Image (cartoon, rainbow, N blue to C red):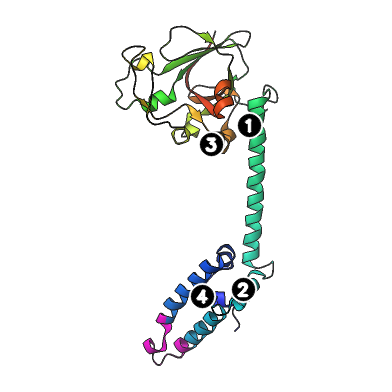
Amino acid sequence: MSKNPFEVFGITPEMAAELTEKELFEVVKSVYRALLKAFHPDANKGKKNSEQKAVELNLAFEALSLDRDPVSFRRQKKAYLNRLPSTAFQQALLMKNQLTQQLEKENRLANNFLSYLTQGDHRNGQPTDAPPDVKLTDANLRLGLLDVAINNNIQKASWILGANYKQLEINPEGKLSIKPVGRRRFSQANYIKLLGCVPVDRLDIAPFLERTPGQFFRYPALSAGVDAPGPRLSVLNLISQENFKRHILNSLEPFFMERAYLFSLNKAEFSTSGLITLEGVIVKLDHL
């Protein structure tokens, strides 16, 4: 037989390489039955090509009968996979290995950068082509933000002014203070480390936010009083490290800018859960 038996059934080397023996033999049997029915001499009387094709199918199936002759099956499979490196299969296999190595390299790079952001000081090494926005390390600023989780959790929006509005303030010494949603005063926030921003038009953030169904969200701005429960909380301003690495880290910029998501490291939260915090969407940026 000039062709490898797997070729007779249209099975590619990639498929033969990835399927188990049993799975591969099931494919062979299914294709054999379908083709034999199509080329059977009784259904194609007088057609010489059909008779030749039926013989070829029978010989190929006999060589690949895992139940009757597993040695032949494995020999044919090995021969099919050990073709010259110049074949399309070997080239595809080489490209696949290169892609795997590249993905592993990028993952290591992302891990190192994330470790740098969460453990070290990232105030040096600003990019030379940085946009003319306010640097993340600048002081004497006040940021107005919309809380993304509150925005997503309000089912029927009869909007109250300030219902999802919070503020961050960086004093001349670079210390951070926060005025959460519904609060009247700023309080120091030494536990927060700002990581960077991603423009909202570059990222659909909702699918990557953590969810905790069934909890109650107590917030003065969303309820009748301080002790009254608000709507059930289904979306959190928290993101797993894996989602942060895969979908956010490559777009993160060390600049404050309006209409951008601001990410931070809440040291207490990160130490217990390992989750990254989404502070909100910057809608106002003022110099004090």
Q: Amino acid at mark 2?
A: Arg
Q: Nearer the viewer, residue 141 or 167?
A: 167
Residue 74 tag number: 2
Residue 54 tag number: none
Q: Residue furthest bottom?
A: 46
The answer to which of marks 3 and 4 sits earlier in the sequence is: 4
Q: Is residue 40 left or right of residue 264?
A: left
What's the CA distance linking mark 2 and mark 3? 42 Å
User: Which one is in front in this view, the residue at disc 1 or the one at disc 2?
Assistant: 2
Q: Position of residue 56 (x, y in %)?
A: 52, 84
The answer to which of marks 3 and 1 sits earlier in the sequence is: 1
- Identify residue for label 3: 243
User: Which one is in front in this view, the residue at disc 2 or the one at disc 3?
Assistant: 2
**Residue at 63% in and 26% down:** 118
Of helix, strand and loop, which one carries label 1? helix
Which residue range is magenta in the image? 37-51
Q: Is residue 53 left or right of residue 226?
A: right
What's the CA distance linking mark 1 and mark 2? 46 Å
Of helix, strand and loop, which one carries label 4? loop
Q: Nearer the viewer, residue 46 or 35?
A: 35
- Identify residue for label 4: 9
Q: Position of residue 72 (x, y in %)?
A: 61, 78
